[in-house]
């Protein structure tokens, strides 16, 4: 094998590795599943008490945003990161509705969702976290 061919093979291998890393940027390498599962259990516990049910939605939203950031989805807001991740999310409409509920909770002081309304919201967050490989 000539030196020129050997150099060509090495350069080709380096290029392939660089391209592979670029295209796998959104792989769940940085996601600590144990962390996300523990945090999700806290969300579920909060959702069972009428006093903290609204806060469970806020916490679920924070957890999803943390996963999006960790996986490298770009955007300066969660909405922008959700748009960037739309191909990964199987229930995009559910996640958007859930995020809107979170915004209502945070920005409208009189808005108090019931446990019954929160259940499908948390299911949407759970599905999104599963889609991303976080839980």
Image: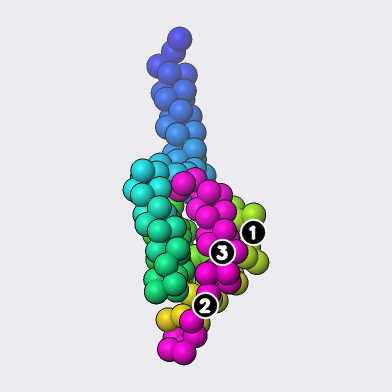
For mark 2, what is the residue? 113
Q: CA distance from mark 1 to mark 2?
A: 21 Å
Residue density around tag 3, few if under 14, some if 14–19, many if 20 or more, within 10 Å? some
39 or 77: which is nearer to us? 39
**Can you tell which of label 1 and label 3 is closer to the viewer?**
3
The earlier-in-sequence mark between 1 and 2 is 1
Quarter of the image where one finds residue 89: bottom right
For mark 3, what is the residue? 119
Tally of numbered discs = 3
Could you tell me which residue is drawn at 58 percent across and 71 percent down? 117
Task: Using the image, tell me which numbered label, if any, was put on residue 91.
Answer: 1
Q: Main secondary structure of the magenta part?
A: helix
Q: CA distance from mark 3 to mark 2?
A: 10 Å
**Can you tell which of label 1 and label 2 is closer to the viewer?**
2
Task: Indicate left or right for 91 with 19 as reference.
Answer: right
Residue 15 % position (x, y): 46, 35
The reply to whether residue 100 is in sight is yes
Could you tell me which residue is drawn at 49 percent across and 65 percent down? 81
Could you tell me which residue is drawn at 42 percent across and 54 percent down? 40
The image's colour scheme reads rainbow
Residue 39 % position (x, y): 37, 54
8 or 21: which is nearer to us? 21
Is residue 116 shown in magenta? yes
Instruction: Read off the magenta span.
Output: 107-135
Residue 115 % position (x, y): 52, 69
């Amino acid at each position: 094998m000539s030196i020129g061919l050997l150099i060509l093979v090495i350069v080709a291998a380096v290029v392939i590795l660089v391209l592979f890393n670029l295209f796998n940027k959104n792989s769940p390498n940085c996601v600590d599943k144990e962390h996300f599962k523990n945090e999700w259990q806290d969300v579920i516990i909060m959702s069972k008490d009428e006093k903290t049910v609204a806060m469970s939605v806020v916490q679920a939203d924070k957890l999803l945003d943390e996963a999006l950031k960790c996986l490298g989805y770009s955007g300066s807001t969660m909405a922008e990161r959700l748009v960037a991740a739309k191909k990964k999310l199987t229930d995009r409409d559910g996640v958007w509705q859930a995020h809107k509920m979170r915004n209502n909770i945070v920005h409208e002081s009189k808005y108090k969702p019931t446990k019954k309304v929160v259940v499908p919201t948390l299911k949407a967050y759970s599905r999104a976290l599963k889609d991303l490989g976080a839980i």
